[in-house]
Image (cartoon, rainbow, N blue to C red):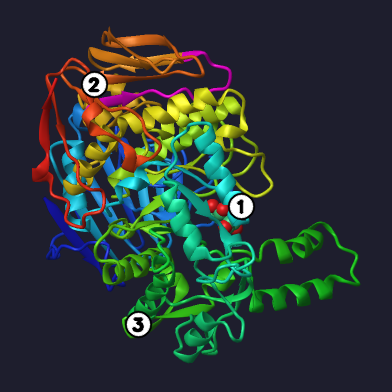
Amino acid sequence: MVKKFRFNNPIATYAVVKDIECEKGALSYFTHNNNAFSYTMSDTTAVYGLGEAVRGINKRGWIYEGYCSDDPCHTEDKRSLYGAHNFLIIDDKNAGGDRFGVFFDYPTRITFDIGYTKQNELVVSVDKPNIDIYIIEGDTLRDIVRNFREIIGQSYVAPKWALGFMQSRWSYFTKDDVERIADSYSDADIPLDAIFLDIDYMERYKDFTIHNERFPDFENFVSYMKQKGVRLVPIIDAAVKVESGYDVYEEGVKNNYFCKGDDNKDYIVGVWPGKAVFPDFLNQDVAKWFGDKYKMLTDMGIEGFWNDMNEPAIFYSEKGLEKAFSQVDSYKEMSLDANTYFDCRDSFSKLSNSQFDYNNFYHNYNGKKIKHNDVHNLYGYFMTKSAQESFERNCPDKRILMFSRASYIGAHRYGGIWTGDNHSWWSHILLCLKQMPSLNMCGFVYSGCDMGGFNGNCTRDLLLRWLSLSIFTPLMRNHSACGTKDQECFAFENTSDFKNIVDLRYRLIPYIYSEYMKAVLSDDMYIRPLSFDYENDEIAKAVEDQLMVGESIMIAPVYTQNANGRYVYIPEDMIQLRLNGDSTISESEIKKGHHYIDIPLNEVVFFIKKDHCIPLCDSAKNIESLDYNTIKLYGNGKSYELYDDDGFTKAPDLSKTKTILK
Ligand code: MIG
């Protein structure tokens, strides 16, 4: 069902874990010409996949790049975001055409022109044709995903508490700030499982340090907060501050653990801490060394991390800065014209994340000196791998939460991802909705976006609507940038409306955890486009703003300002569940077809498939306090297959699933 085609001499990525022999014949489906692989689509062909990307669930009509990019403005004109997820499904089966999946395993920039230059041409191109291409077949779209996921290995399993609601901000500066957030949630009676620590918990942005004035006696504070029911999740940045006396820096220098320039000296960049260096995560000794550093925090009771800035993000490099200063110097005495003025201005503004830098430092990968840009997409992936492998060694008895900003397929075995710096825009609720199923195809099941939006100011109505989507994503975290308006649920009027919806998340946990675990353990998708469940339904195929969540639920969130409801396509007779403003739930039948559904701001509506049932329990202050004895089944099915475990076990076992009858 999977065929592997090798072109020339690819650099190993370890994305695929299954041994597959290379085919001798010509590449299936595509024609190949130098650096380009082409496929002709028909008018009805749909193209799915690409994980974290802008635009539709059906990716046709734009040009994308697989190239990890630190880009804080996720508009439609962008070609790449933080992850490079080069898996596509091409589907024209209903019209008698092809249906297959294809994975382009390539560690640096790759371009997917999907009907952008020519409406019916799909052209995938690379700079150097050293590449492995996998063609994945299967009867159904879901089979194709399962067959693909089987070769890339089982997705990371998050601890159960990480399915709770989590609050973040850049930054909660002090321990008092953190405690105030927890207390305000508890005063508003809104459940909460974790609070995130952004870069300011560190001493001058140095990884694996704690700012002692802001967080005195950190270890006690971690356990004090855990007693309150809230876990703390610190950030770790990719770059290490250059500072004599700082152990991480000094050990790295001594052992040659940092990426080098072509002069074989440590390549110096500027990021949060000022001058900094990049641990060479591609080198196994470095990965082990850096991974073991997390132990300082896990020893203090920390059970989760988020890895940031690992595309890697670069503000400037010493070399780049030197160039910029001398360029600007040369403009000093000139009368700047249309060209020179903009060049002068860009000397600095184009310093960040530049090709100049990505081409100027090197890794020691499998014993070879390799230019960063040739393996660019592996950097964040190997950082996450280094962390997760250290947890296996140092915390073998429990699951540690780990999610990353940059990623490549393969990284899904070691952690989840969040979708980075979105905006508090209505259109970004919809963007998140479209990213989720595509990420599931690529193995990133534990994923979510910054609920409420990272950049910009969030309003009450936006957050309420965003919540109604995010209560269904495994990672459910409210996060926002420094300088933005307060975005915690209690920062807005009538917190009871927020409580009502967050409570629903907790009431749904028996279902969400069960479905999440079943998906992960059987290489399946937890969130799917409608077309994956209703393959022969041409209307469902075109729906881009509704999703299937787990085996039994369909959601249709509101994502427009001032709407009181929306049109929903019901692909078969279903049961409509409505969370009312007074936190009661009502059930009613709804027939196949198009319906306008009223959805007031403080209500949530979703749908249960015919002959299916879902379990809901009573809400509680956090995941650990949920009482499954309160489970009731909703829907018109007869039973539900519930998976549950202690939420920490490293050996989750689907055979423990039990049937609960209605
Ligand atoms: O350059 O750590 O995407 O979530 O709050 C910004 C500060 C660096 C980017 C992350 C964001 C985080 C922020 N970081």
Front label number (1 vs 3): 1
Image position of 141 (left or right of 139) = right
Whichever of callouts 1 and 3 sits on the residue coming sooner in the sequence is: 1
* 281 up-or-down from 397: above or below: below
Instruction: Give the percent coordinates (x, y) of residue 104.
Output: 30, 57
Residue type at the position of mark 2: Asp
What's the residue at 30%, 19% (across, down)?
Answer: 607
| Nearer to us in this view, 82 or 9 | 82
Q: Residue 456: x percent and y percent?
A: 64, 40
Callout 2 secondary element: loop
Classify the position of the C terminus by image quarter: top left
- The verdict on residue 300 being magenta is no
Q: CA distance from mark 2 to mark 1?
A: 54 Å
Considering only order in the chain, which callout, 1 or 2, is on the residue closer to the N terminus? 1
Task: For residue 550, say whether it is visible.
Answer: no
- Residue 561 on the magenta segment: yes
Identify the magenta region.
552-565
Q: Is residue 637 left or right of residue 165?
A: left
In the rendered image of this protein, does residue 577 appear above or below residue 118? above
Residue 349 percent across, percent down from the top left: 70, 61
Above or below for 36 versus 499: below
The prevailing secondary structure element of the residues shown in magenta is loop
The x and y percentages for residue 69 are 51, 57
Q: Quadrant of ligand 1?
A: bottom right
Give the amino acid at mark 1.
Answer: Asp
* Label disc, if present, on residue 285 of the rendered structure: 3
Name the secondary structure under disc 3: helix
| Residue where numbered disc 1 is placed | 176
> For residue 537, which numbered disc appears in the image?
2
